């Protein structure tokens, strides 16, 4: 960072932090549900690592083909293009996700407004480490999703009345009206 202004170094630091945060949020986002078939073949608790430099994903110490790896890789390419950087700017970009597969009935019993037809919900916790020649950043993110790959044996009906908070104060629904001007009326 020799010869770099403090403003430039703060901007780069923010860019690196943003990359780490985004990778963590994407890794536990809704698209993680599509790796359900891989996780269903594994123990109920475990972890997987995605190395975005080597472009390799490992589930419970065995190399695996995770769809999430491709999603993160594509996002990272787009972000690097936006920042006008090459991939060799990174010295490390690693996402570690710990998972726990929970029977969906257990989740629905404790969350009456939650519903899924899938057999399992994955509780996901990601930690991210990103290092570049300009700095490092760590981030973490948690989420839970029903995973694809196995339907529940007994499908529960959807909740009849999802919980909707009551409107209070001046907040009221807004009626959206057309944006075209009214057609002129002909005189008869």
Image (spheres, rainbow, N blue to C red):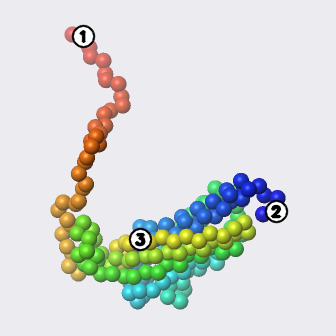
Quarter of the rendering containing residue 8: bottom right
Tag 1 residue: 187
> Which quadrant, please, contains the N terminus?
bottom right
Dot 3: element: strand
Q: Looking at the image, is 182 positioned above or below residue 112?
A: above
Q: Residue at 82% of width from left, 58% of height from top?
A: 3
Image position of 41 (left or right of 78)? left
Image position of 29 (left or right of 156)? right
Tag 2 residue: 2
Image position of 80 (left or right of 105)? right
Q: Decide which of tag 1 and tag 2 comes sooner along the chain.
A: 2
In percent of width and height, residue 187 lies at: 24, 10
In percent of width and height, residue 109 lies at: 23, 75
Residue depth check, mark 1 versus mark 3: number of the one nearer the observer = 3
Residue depth check, mark 2 versus mark 3: number of the one nearer the observer = 2
Name the residue nearer the viewer: 168 or 53: 168
Q: Decide which of tag 1 and tag 3 comes sooner along the chain.
A: 3
- The crowding category of the residue bearing disc 1, from other C-alpha atoms within 10 Å (few below 14, some 14 to 19, many at least 20), is few
How much space separates mark 1 and mark 3, taking CA atoms? 63 Å
Whether label 1 touches label 3, CB < 8 Å: no
Tag 3 residue: 143
Q: Residue at 23% of width from left, 59% of height from top?
A: 163
Name the residue nearer the viewer: 18 or 59: 18
Quarter of the rendering containing residue 32: bottom left
How much space separates mark 2 and mark 3, taking CA atoms? 40 Å
In percent of width and height, residue 125 lies at: 46, 76
Residue depth check, mark 1 versus mark 2: number of the one nearer the observer = 2
In percent of width and height, residue 133 lies at: 73, 69
How much space separates mark 1 and mark 2, taking CA atoms? 78 Å
Q: Decide which of tag 2 and tag 3 comes sooner along the chain.
A: 2
Q: Residue furthest top?
A: 188
């Amino acid at each position: 960072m020799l010869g770099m202004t403090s403003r430039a170094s703060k901007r780069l630091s923010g860019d690196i932090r943003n990359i780490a945060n985004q990778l963590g949020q994407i890794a536990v986002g809704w698209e993680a549900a599509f790796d359900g078939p891989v996780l269903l073949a594994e123990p109920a608790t475990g972890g997987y690592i995605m190395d975005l430099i080597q472009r390799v994903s490992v589930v419970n110490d065995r190399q695996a083909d995770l769809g999430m790896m491709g999603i993160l890789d594509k996002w990272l390419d787009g972000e690097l293009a936006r920042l006008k950087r090459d991939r060799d700017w990174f010295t490390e970009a690693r996402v570690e996700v710990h998972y726990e597969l929970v029977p969906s009935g257990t989740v629905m019993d404790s969350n009456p407004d939650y519903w899924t037809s899938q057999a399992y919900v994955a509780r996901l916790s990601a930690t991210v480490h990103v290092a570049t020649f300009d700095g490092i950043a760590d981030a973490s993110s948690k989420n839970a999703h029903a995973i694809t790959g196995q339907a529940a044996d007994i499908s529960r009906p959807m909740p009849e009345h999802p919980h909707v908070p009551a409107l209070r104060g001046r907040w009221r629904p807004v009626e959206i009206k057309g944006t075209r001007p009214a057609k002129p009326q002909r005189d008869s």
